[in-house]
Image: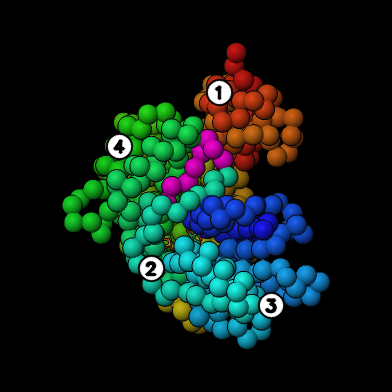
Amino acid sequence: MNYKITTYGCQMNENDSEKISGMLMELGHVSVEDENMADIVILNTCSVRENANDKFFGHLGRYKRVKRDRPELILAICGCMMQQESVVAEVKSKHRHVDIVFGTHNIHEFPDMLSNHMEKHEMVVGVWQEGGEIVENLPVDRKYDFKAYVSIMNGCNNFCSYCIVPYTRGRERSRSIDSIKMEVEALAQNGCREITLLGQNVNSYGNTFEDSVGFGTLMRELAKTEGLDRIRFMTSHPKDLSDEVIEAIAEEPKICNHIHLPVQSGSSRILKDMNRKYDKDSYIALVEKIKERIPEVALTTDIIVGFPGETEEDFQDTLDVMEKCRFDLAFTFLYSPREGTPAWGRDDQVPEDLKHERLNRLLEVHNKIGREINEGYVGKSLDVLVEGPSKNNPKNLSGRTETAKLVNFPGDMSLTGKIVKVKITQAKTFSLNGEIEQ
Ligand code: 5AD
Ligand code: SF4
């Protein structure tokens, strides 16, 4: 059968989709781009913000018509939203055209659920409330052969007061260093140049182990992999970023000089309410320490605007942190109340128009700083891992520097997957232009 997977949300979901695709391929099914050609449609959902939930139900409704025309189409839904009981209840009562429902902890059960459905022709629902041991050795259908996601841990124990992830992805569990090494070695042998280590909080990698194999040790071990050029990682929680990890990045050339370090807010009062366990000053001090030890580092962050009770003064602190830390890139979000999280029911919610107004002001500062940082790259010669044709101009190539900057430049498609030296000729707000050095 032909199948089409649509993925919403973060890299964790993308990596899960690669595993779902891997399992289907192993069974002889074929991945297709065009949904009209698909016999199985799989929607891998995200629930981090409320509008993702709303959009998904709108989207799901459309399949009622599709299934009226093509009743044999198998519709499977999975991902974080399915870990919410209210969502599964709504699917069961109002979306009977869905065929298979599974969650984030049991993607390995999908092939069995599929055959079960094909035998019985009824809705098959299986969602585990808690994740057990991480299931190893699932086949992975990777999007690229020269770069790959490697998930090193599942779940999150931090319970930031706005965040639904600890409820949808469960408690933190780390994979063993040996199984990660085996996966990375196999990738490198097959021509992979860059890996991105994934976890909700990579800095607490190994905390559940008896011996103290920390994240720094893991990265140093992986850096020994022959043929591998780059190691990236995300996400780092500021409260747990150790000197050991900073040293590993500084000393080991294969570990990219890029840290994604979500600050979420610049206000110490709001950070306390968010349960982030650091404050404005300690975050700025951490950034200063990183920049001193790794002068070339690129810092990216996540910022939430309009957390309940956020005043103009709190927001000014966020602007101040942006100015002081000079992030290369910030992913900015309007606070979205998530049912079941501590911040959800608060009666001091910030009005929507005020949230938007603050977000716009934040973006203005952000874009100015981003452009200034990018202008500093003009004239420099940088290693770029070529990813393929540029989105805006398919005649150009695009790729990323060690510091995760997007670079566009003329060149031959055969360079895809290779690391080339590019001289930067022009800076834009979100990207760089350049020319290959001969
Ligand atoms: N509202 C807005 N943004 C959120 N994030 C997580 N939960 C919420 C929420 N309820 C953001 C955080 C996190 C990123 C992945 O999503 O900034 O770092
Ligand atoms: Fe959510 Fe906080 Fe865990 Fe990140 S660290 S996944 S924001 S609870």
Name the mark on residue 131: 2
| Vertical comparison of 289 with 320: above or below | above
Q: Which residue is mark 4?
A: 220
Q: Amino acid at mark 2?
A: Gly
Q: CA distance from mark 1 to mark 3?
A: 50 Å
Q: CA distance from mark 3 to mark 2?
A: 27 Å
Q: CA distance from mark 1 to mark 4?
A: 25 Å
Q: CA distance from mark 4 to mark 2?
A: 28 Å
> What residue is shown at x 25% (from left), y 59% (from top)?
208
Q: Quadrant of residue 378?
A: top right
> What residue is shown at x 67% (from left), y 58% (from top)?
1
10 Å neighbourhood of mark 1: few (<14), some, or many (≥20)?
some
Which of the two marks, 1 or 3, is nearer to us in this view? 3
Q: Is residue 300 left or right of residue 281?
A: right
The front one of 321 and 14 is 14
Q: Quadrant of residue 145?
A: top right
Residue 218 located within the stretch drawn in magenta:
no
Which of the two marks, 1 or 2, is nearer to us in this view? 2
- The residues colored magenta run 144-151
Q: Is residue 89 left or right of residue 223?
A: right
Q: Position of residue 239 (x, y in %)?
A: 32, 55
Can residue 425 be seen in this snapshot?
no
Quarter of the image with the C terminus in it: top right
Q: Earlier in the sequence, mark 1 or mark 2?
A: 2
Can residue 5 be seen in this snapshot?
yes
Q: Which residue is mark 3?
A: 97
| Vertical comparison of 126 with 256: above or below | below
Q: Amino acid at mark 3?
A: His
10 Å neighbourhood of mark 3: few (<14), some, or many (≥20)?
many
Which of the two marks, 4 or 2, is nearer to us in this view? 2
